[in-house]
Amino acid sequence: MFRLAAASLAGTAIEFYDFFVYGTAAALVLGPLFFPTFSPLAGTLAAFGTFAVGFVARPLGSVVFGHIGDRYGRRPVLVGSLLLTGASTVAVGCVPTYGTIGVAAPVLLLLLRFLQGFGLGGEWGGAVLLTAEHAPAERRGLWSSFPQVGPAVGFLLANGVTLALAASLSEAQFAQWGWRVPFWAAGVLAVAGLWLRSSLPESPRFLELRDHARVPLVEVVRDHGRLVLLTAGALAVGYAIFYAVTTWSLAYGTERLGVSRVDMLVCIMGAVLVKGSLTPVAAMLGDRYGRRPLCLAGCAAAAVWMFPMVALLATGEPLLMFVGFLGALLAFVTMFAVIAAYLPELYEPRVRCTGAAVGYNLGGVLGGALTPIAATALAEQGGRVPWGVGAYLTGIALFSLGCFALLPETRPVRAVAAAPVMD
């Protein structure tokens, strides 16, 4: 289990590295490089628009890769999604800017971002199911949380590289070529990820199935449509919080508050590091007390903390900003640490890869795609403290709280240590 969980974590970290490095670049440099005819605000909004395309592509990727996972196994999903995401990320680092090829530059950027999101849409379902379906029932939450640590590791890798470059290069050097380096590094990481995943065993639960769904998406829509919509709405707040902290606040702090890139990245990375470290702890609580109670508690905490978070951000003081970000991400991890066990348990095995992945990635469209754009526009309308952003995030938290309240508990009532597959 440890080898399997570690390989899933590493692969997920690599794919989320690819996804996050784009978000950081969008917040820092893509606006003036690819949309130079826009005003600074419009350029940032346009860059966040290309960022949002990745989220729109993720449900489509989850449909295609989910079909493969439910029909042919979880392992092919892991390899295919990693290849697609890695190749498209390297290609982003090679796209000429608007000054070189004109309007073709943002068009290429948009296409490659779509392919990034398409690949990532398949990654989560494959990695989570391969781990969850091997795990013993009484520790399924814990082992399934390892892939959930991957996004934190990927974020820290992406921003660590960006931070090192921002600290060591001049503004001109960073804008000319420095921002491309993290994208090129994705190629090396993709090769390492493929090597790690080459020897992973197929899910025992999948191998036990004798009657595979012919068209998994049709069965999911027909038999589990309400469940997909509820899970998407429930997960929206987690995406909204994470990308408000890691993407929108980075642009807001550097552009509106005049905080240095290095200080902003250090504050955000510190909060993400704590969040990633506590993910297995929260998952163990989910094994003991249930998935749904932790999700409800996380949503409630998020609703309470969003206004304090934006107030602390507006101070521009690194320590206070770190406290604001940390409180938000602690609410986030309370929910998302158990999601990797919760979502697969909600769906029957024959359509589990499609159902869980589609619900998860639709939540990304609702919460992740729109948040940087909406928050940037709302912050522009207010004073130094972006209260409108706090209200927006609080509203999403309350909406997700209602969705979680309508979902059932799934933690096995009687944990059977000898059972190596999902109930």
Image (cartoon, rainbow, N blue to C red):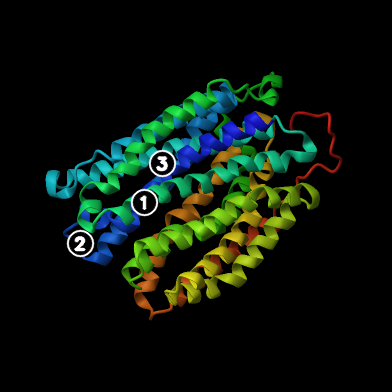
Residue type pointed to by label 1: Ala
Q: Amino acid at mark 2?
A: Phe
**Considering the image in quadrants, where does the C terminus appear?**
top right
Q: Whole-percent x and y of residue 401?
A: 64, 62
Q: Element at badge 1? A: helix
Per the image, the residue denoted by label 1 is 164
In whole angstroms, how far apart are the C-alphas of marks 1 and 3?
17 Å
Is residue 19 shown above or below 402? above
Q: Is residue 4 above or below residue 167?
A: above
Say which label, 2 or 1, has the lower sequence index: 2
Q: Nearer the viewer, mark 1 or mark 3?
A: 1
Locate residue 126 relative to residue 291 in the image: left or right.
left
Residue type pointed to by label 3: Asp
Image marks 2 and 3: residues in contact by CB distance under 8 Å: no
Compare marks 1 and 3 and give the one earlier in the sequence. 3
Q: Is residue 139 left or right of residue 60?
A: right
Total marks in image: 3
**CA–CA distance between discs 2 and 1?**
29 Å
Residue ID for mark 2:
38
Say which residue appears at 53% left-offset and 75% top-offset.
307
Instruction: Quarter of the image for the N terminus: give it.
Output: top right
- Up-down: is 62 above or below 399? above
Callout 1 touching callout 3 (CB < 8 Å)? no
Tell me the crowding category of disc 1: few under 14, some 14 to 19, or many 20 or more residues within 10 angstroms, Cα based.
few
SS category of the residue bearing label 2: loop
Inspect this view and state whether residue 233 appears: no
Pick the residue in front: 229 or 169: 169
Residue farthest bottom in this picture: 383
The residue tagged with tag 3: helix, strand or loop?
Answer: helix
